[in-house]
Amino acid sequence: MSEKVESTGMDLLKEVANVSGKPGLFRILKPSRAGVIVESLDEKREKTLIGPTARVSVLKDVSIFTDGAEESVALSDVFLKIREIHGEEVTLSAKTSSDKELIEFLAEVLPEFDRTKVYVSDIKKVISWYNLLSKYTPEAFVVTEGEVETAAEPAAEAASEVSEEAKEAPAKKAAKKEKSKA
């Protein structure tokens, strides 16, 4: 009834955010009356209060536009693909690489990315965010085994129940007709 499924620590991305106008990534600690308290993801681990007018993007909600059947791919999926291809660190420098090299990098990881909506600056962010997460929160990439009920089994059970009801329906209908005649 249940099957072992691998999941990752990518759920940690709901605690990590990018703050517009500030370099790097931040771990969200807790909300306050004046905004949200965050901690920088670097060796300094500085705590800062981010005001309510700041634009904060939680990485769990970030995705990359694609040309495929799906309009976008979650950033967590892109990070896992980068890990699979490049390992713990992307050696391509986001600051000194040419636009062509950066586009080729993302094309290798996500071939169907939308070249009209994804800018070179976005690719640079993906690389720097990946390297920061890999260095300061490696637990985000740890694979664990959990038990998750498979969707196929309940669907198959529901289908068999529906087919049993479908078989019984004509008989019930005929019996009901006989009662109404009497």
Image (cartoon, rainbow, N blue to C red):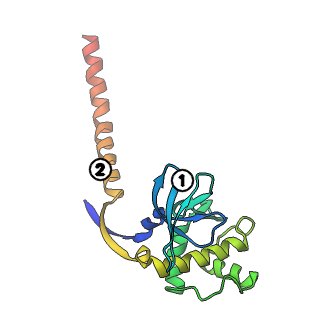
2 and 37: which one is in front?
37
**How many marks overall?**
2
Front disc: 1 or 2: 1
Per the image, label 2 sits on a secondary structure element best described as: helix
Q: Residue at x 49, y 82 (%)?
A: 135
In percent of width and height, residue 73 lies at 57, 65
Q: Three-letter amino acid code at disc 1?
A: Gly
Q: Considering only order in the chain, which callout, 2 or 1, is on the residue closer to the N terminus?
A: 1
Quadrant in which the C terminus appears: top left
In percent of width and height, residue 162 lies at 33, 41
Per the image, label 1 sits on a secondary structure element best described as: strand
Q: Residue at x 64, y 77 (%)?
A: 106
Q: Three-letter amino acid code at disc 2?
A: Glu
Residue 157 badge: 2
Quadrant in which the N terminus appears: bottom left
In percent of width and height, residue 139 lies at 40, 76
- Callout 2: few (<14), some (14-19), or many (20+) C-alpha neighbours within 10 Å? few
Query: Considering only vertical position in the picture, is 182 above or below 30?
Result: above
Q: Residue at x 53, y 74 (%)?
A: 79
Q: Is 10 left, or right, of 171 in this rendering?
A: right
Query: Considering only vertical position in the picture, is 152 above or below 47?
Result: above
Residue 35 badge: 1
